Image: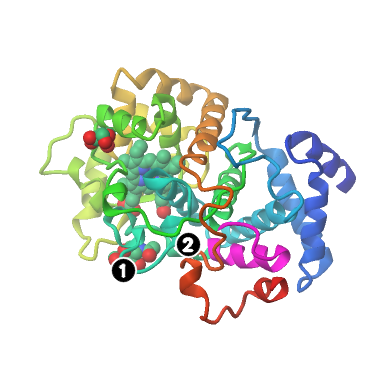
């Protein structure tokens, strides 16, 4: 059974020379856990990969990225990330949505450089669109970073860990498996307020969304497919109040609108939330596009995709054909994951995802055995 699984895995996962070895090295590196338990978990997470649709994306890569970047320096990284993401989702399924949104908010403003993970008063996290990022998901990324650095030394960037964790969250929620190119390095500084301001708003219309994506070299197919990430997760009332009374909106199902209005009527602390996909809120599937057909998209930016001639055909196709959605989503994620990346000697490998190294050095790096071991 085990051998059969590993044998199939090596056919499924193009690009990595011997995937079974990574499952084994997770087992051997996790000295503080029972080896048997680690093997069982490695197998169960491999099963998750095998049961999901695999999309092979074969596009030219950004300079400095590769499909096999850590094969020599940290062969266990993918197994470690997958194990931690699977475990975290077992406790809190919402972390998947948290990771996927963090990835988008990191990559879109100034590229996938983990700048979003920097904390502090002038950080991206203090900017308006980030105020609803899930702290549990931010913490998970740094927990994984600690485990990976413990196994391999500080070789893997927070940007790559975020990318891998996001991919695994998609898979673990029922979405497609796709290889992601690696080799990103971490930025020194948060994106400016102006750059964070380029993130699209939920009240944007389709022409504005198309322009804002185009500004980041993402096309209309990327917009329609990546918006499908709203198949998981939630939104706060403030993000869709523009569609509720007293405002008029005839693009939303009146019964749904009434429910939302009732729900948001008593929200003194701004903490009330609504799932983004009313049909299957925690599953990564194409039901989001069904919602749009039923006029039950939560944001104006969602619903617009089914109403505007530039996007309607593709949104409809994704509602009819989940494989087509998965295929385009995988391509668009791989594309977004390469936007303005730092590689080679640019940036750094952060020793703590929340702070650049010059701020960490001198501070207590306790809990990161990898640093001590590697030094
Ligand atoms: C097309 C333009 C987009 C707009 C206007 C938009 C806007 C939003 C807003 C307003 C929220 C809810 C925030 C809150 O009230 O808590 C949200 C949540 C979310 N967005 Fe987007 N988004 C867009 C594209 C994307 C993309 C490209 C992705 C990822 C590929 C993404 C992934 C998510 C996820 C997973 C959540 C749920 C987060 C959670 O439950 O913690 N979004 N988005
Ligand atoms: C796209 O970029 C141009 C030039 O920087 C800018 O003026 C415009 O506001 C941007 N559009 C959107 C929707 O972000
Ligand atoms: C996740 C996270 O750090 N969110 C921050 C967003 O900004 C607000 C206001 O500055 C902070 O209080 C949150 O902690």
Q: Nearer the viewer, residue 152 or 174?
A: 152
In what quadrant of the picture does the C terminus appear? bottom right
> Is 144 contained in the magenta span?
yes
The range drawn in magenta is: 141-157
Left or right: 348 with respect to 73?
Answer: left
Quarter of the view holding residue 256? top left
- For the point 78% across and 65% down, the residue is 29
Q: Residue furthest left?
A: 246
Residues packed near mark 1 inside 10 Å, few (<14), some (14 to 19) or many (20 plus)? few
Dots 2, 1 in contact, CB < 8 A:
no
Residue 224 position within the rendered picture, expressed as x and y whole percent measured from the top left: 41, 29
- Find residue 121 and name its label: 1
Residues packed near mark 2 inside 10 Å, few (<14), some (14 to 19) or many (20 plus)? many
Above or below: residue 77 compared with residue 223:
below
Q: How many marks?
A: 2
Q: Nearer the viewer, residue 281 or 23?
A: 23
Main SS of the magenta part reads helix
Ligand 3 contact, mark 1 (Cβ < 8 Å)? yes
Ligand 3 contact, mark 2 (Cβ < 8 Å)? yes
Residue highlighted by disc 2: 138
Residue 295 position within the rendered picture, expressed as x and y whole percent measured from the top left: 30, 31
């Amino acid at each position: 059974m085990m051998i059969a699984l590993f044998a199939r895995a090596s056919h499924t996962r193009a690009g990595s020379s011997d995937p079974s070895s990574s499952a084994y090295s997770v087992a051997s590196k996790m000295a503080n856990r029972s080896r048997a338990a680690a093997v069982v978990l490695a197998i169960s997470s491999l099963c998750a990969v095998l049961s999901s649709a695999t999309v092979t994306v074969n596009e030219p890569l950004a300079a400095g990225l590769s499909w096999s970047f850590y094969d020599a320096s940290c062969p266990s990284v993918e197994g470690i990330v997958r194990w931690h993401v699977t475990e975290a989702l077992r406790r809190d399924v919402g972390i998947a949505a948290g990771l996927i949104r963090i990835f988008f908010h990191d990559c879109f403003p100034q590229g996938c450089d983990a700048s979003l993970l920097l904390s502090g008063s002038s950080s991206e996290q203090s900017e308006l669109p980030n105020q609803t990022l899930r702290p549990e998901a931010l913490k998970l990324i740094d927990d994984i970073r600690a485990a990976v650095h413990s196994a391999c030394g500080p070789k893997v960037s927070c940007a790559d860990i975020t990318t891998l964790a996001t991919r695994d969250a998609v898979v673990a929620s029922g979405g497609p498996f796709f290889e992601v190119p690696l080799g990103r390095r971490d930025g020194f500084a948060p994106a400016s307020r102006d750059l964070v301001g380029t993130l699209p708003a939920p009240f944007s219309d389709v022409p504005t969304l198309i322009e804002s994506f185009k500004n980041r070299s993402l096309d209309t197919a990327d917009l329609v497919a990546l918006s499908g990430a709203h198949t998981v997760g939630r939104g706060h009332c403030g993000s869709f109040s523009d569609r509720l009374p007293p405002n008029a909106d005839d693009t939303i199902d009146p019964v749904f609108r009434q429910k939302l209005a009732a729900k948001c009527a008593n929200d003194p602390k701004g903490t009330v939330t609504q799932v983004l996909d009313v049909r299957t809120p925690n599953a990564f599937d194409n039901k989001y596009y069904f919602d749009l057909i039923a006029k039950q998209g939560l944001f104006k930016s969602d619903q617009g995709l089914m109403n505007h001639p530039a996007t309607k055909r593709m949104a409809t196709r994704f509602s009819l054909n989940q494989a087509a959605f998965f295929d385009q989503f995988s391509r668009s994620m791989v594309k977004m994951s390469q936007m303005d990346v730092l590689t080679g000697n640019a940036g750094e490998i952060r020793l703590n995802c929340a702070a650049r190294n010059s701020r960490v050095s001198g501070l207590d790096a306790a809990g990161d055995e990898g640093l001590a071991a590697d030094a």
